[in-house]
């Protein structure tokens, strides 16, 4: 492993959506909110029984709407809201050059020291880096090649307080 790993990427709409979706999926997977979908399914089942036995369709209708939202429209609605915020963002279409070394991750604007990194999550899409003050997404295409990506993963495992691989 070399001493410094150079990273560069542009924070364009595609990268922003990829980062948002990856963070959302990871955080939802590790959140108690994920059980809401199961509750909606249970409500739907009770609604079917109530509709068949008593002719009451209110619970069935409400729970069906919630299940359809949860499994089919949740990301689409979130995506529209995210794109509105991206269009207003000052970092829109900004290109970043960073260096990751044994001290931390350095860019022209900020330095995140490894001692302040609480968790690094390796995903197919890239790396989520959660620090004391903020979070950062480094997409897979920021690395020159697979070897540099693996070097970064090794460095993150050694230096971050926690490292999780989610693929």
Image (spheres, rainbow, N blue to C red):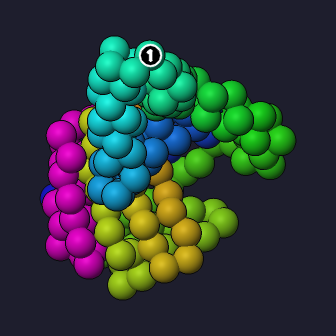
Residue at the image position 49 percent from the left and 20 percent from the top: 57
Please state which of residues 87 and 49 is positioned toward the viewer in this rendering: 49
Residue neighbourhood size for the residue with mark 1, other residues' Cα within 10 Å, grouped as few (<14), some (14–19), many (≥20):
few
Residue 66 seen from this side = yes
Question: Which stretch is magenta?
Answer: 142-167
Which residue is disc 1 drawn over?
A: 55
Position in image of residue 83 (x %, y %): 70, 32
Residue 117 place in picture, x, y as percent: 38, 75
The image quadrant where one finds the C terminus is top left
Along the line of sight, which residue is nearer the eye, 51 or 129? 51
Who is closer to the viewer here, 75 or 33? 33
Q: Is residue 42 left or right of residue 147?
A: right
In the image, 92 versus 70, the foreground residue is 70
Identify the residue shown where x is 48% and y is 30%. Answer: 59
Query: Residue placed at 55% from the left, 69% from the top?
Result: 134
Whether residue 144 appears in magenta in the rendering, the answer is: yes
Where does the image place residue 20, in percent across and percent down from the top left? 52, 41
Confirm whether the magenta stretch covers residue 80.
no
């Amino acid at each position: 492993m070399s001493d410094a790993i150079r990273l560069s990427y542009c924070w364009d709409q595609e990268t922003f959506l990829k980062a948002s979706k990856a963070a959302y999926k990871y955080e939802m997977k590790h959140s108690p909110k994920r059980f809401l979908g199961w509750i909606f399914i249970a409500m739907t089942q009770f609604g079917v029984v109530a509709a068949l036995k008593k002719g009451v369709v209110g619970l069935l209708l409400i729970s069906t709407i919630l299940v359809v939202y949860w499994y089919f429209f949740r990301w689409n609605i979130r995506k529209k809201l995210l794109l509105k915020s991206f269009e207003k963002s000052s970092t829109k279409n900004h290109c970043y050059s960073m260096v990751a070394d044994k001290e931390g991750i350095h860019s022209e604007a900020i330095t995140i020291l490894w001692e302040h990194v609480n968790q690094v999550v390796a995903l197919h899409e890239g790396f989520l880096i959660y620090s004391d003050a903020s979070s950062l997404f480094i997409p897979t295409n920021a690395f020159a090649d697979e070897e540099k990506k693996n070097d970064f993963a090794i460095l993150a495992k050694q230096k971050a307080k926690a490292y999780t691989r989610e693929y």
